[in-house]
Image (spheres, grey):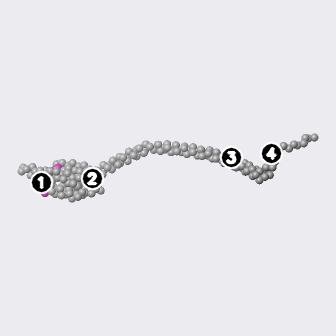
Amino acid sequence: MSAPKTNINLLPKNELEKTSLGKFFKWALTFGKYIVIVTQLIVIVAFLFRFKLDQDLDGLNERISQQQQVVSSYQDLEQEVRVLQDRLSALKDITNEQTLLSLSLGSLNQVMPLEVGLTSLTLNKSNFTLEGRSLSEVGLATLVYGLQNQPIFDNIVVRSVSTGGAKDPTLSFALNANIIKKGEKKSL
């Protein structure tokens, strides 16, 4: 005959399970198991998501590295472009200065009377100095008046006027004037 089955109950039912407090504890333990399981699932998902984020980060770092190489490869080209821009700026300044000097010479040529001859002309971007000879006072006065009426010249100053005496009736003169740049106004 077989031995009778013994029933071992390690968790015997007691009076606590029958009370409201016992039922609450039983419900809390059951619900607590589910909370622990859900929390573990969230942790596992977060852990797996971290692997995906690490993989994305590695991909982004690799793309950044490639882009840095591309940018650094253009560094020489950028240097050349900057040098060319500096040269173009210098060329523009020279061209503007030459244009101003050309306009100055053209304006000076327009007002120069036939009876006045120049012995020296010093011209730069802000002023000029004339030295010359005039056959008469009228010629010198015409030159000064013409320079005053030109919009490009300002502050005309006659520095010296002298005559050669009876044997040389010509007038020797020296005068200075400022050159007005485009956009500047003539002083009154």
Whether 151 is drawn above or below 60: the answer is below
- Callout 2 environment at 10 Å: few (<14), some (14 to 19), or many (20+)? many
Q: Is residue 118 at all visible to an observer of this figure?
A: no
80 and 155: which is toward the camera? 155
Spatial separation of the CA atoms under disc 2 and disc 1: 30 Å
What amino acid is at disc 2?
Leu
Q: Are marks 2 and 4 in contact (CB under 8 Å)?
A: no
Mark 3 or 1 closer to N-term? 3
- Callout 4 environment at 10 Å: few (<14), some (14 to 19), or many (20+)? few
In this view, the mark in front (3 or 1): 3
What amino acid is at disc 3?
Gln
Please name the residue that numbered disc 4 is placed on.
Answer: 11
| Residue 98 x, y percent position in the rendering | 28, 50
Instruction: Check the image and name the residue furthest to the left.
Output: 166
In this view, the mark in front (4 or 1): 4
The residue sitting at 57% across, 43% down in the picture is 58
Mark 2 or 4 closer to N-term? 4
- Callout 3 environment at 10 Å: few (<14), some (14 to 19), or many (20+)? few
| Residue 32 x, y percent position in the rendering | 72, 49
Please name the residue that numbered disc 2 is placed on.
Answer: 100
Snapshot quadrant of residue 137? bottom left
| Residue 60 x, y percent position in the rendering | 55, 45
Badge 3 marks a residue whose secondary structure is helix
User: With 120 as the anchor, is 84 left or right in this view?
Assistant: right
Question: What is the number of the mark on residue 135?
Answer: 1
Image quadrant holding the N terminus, namely: top right
Please say whether residue 113 is one of the residues in the magenta stretch: no
Please name the residue that numbered disc 3 is placed on.
Answer: 40
Part of the protein shown in magenta: 131-138
Mark 4 or 3 closer to N-term? 4
In this view, the mark in front (3 or 2): 3
The residue sitting at 66% across, 48% down in the picture is 42
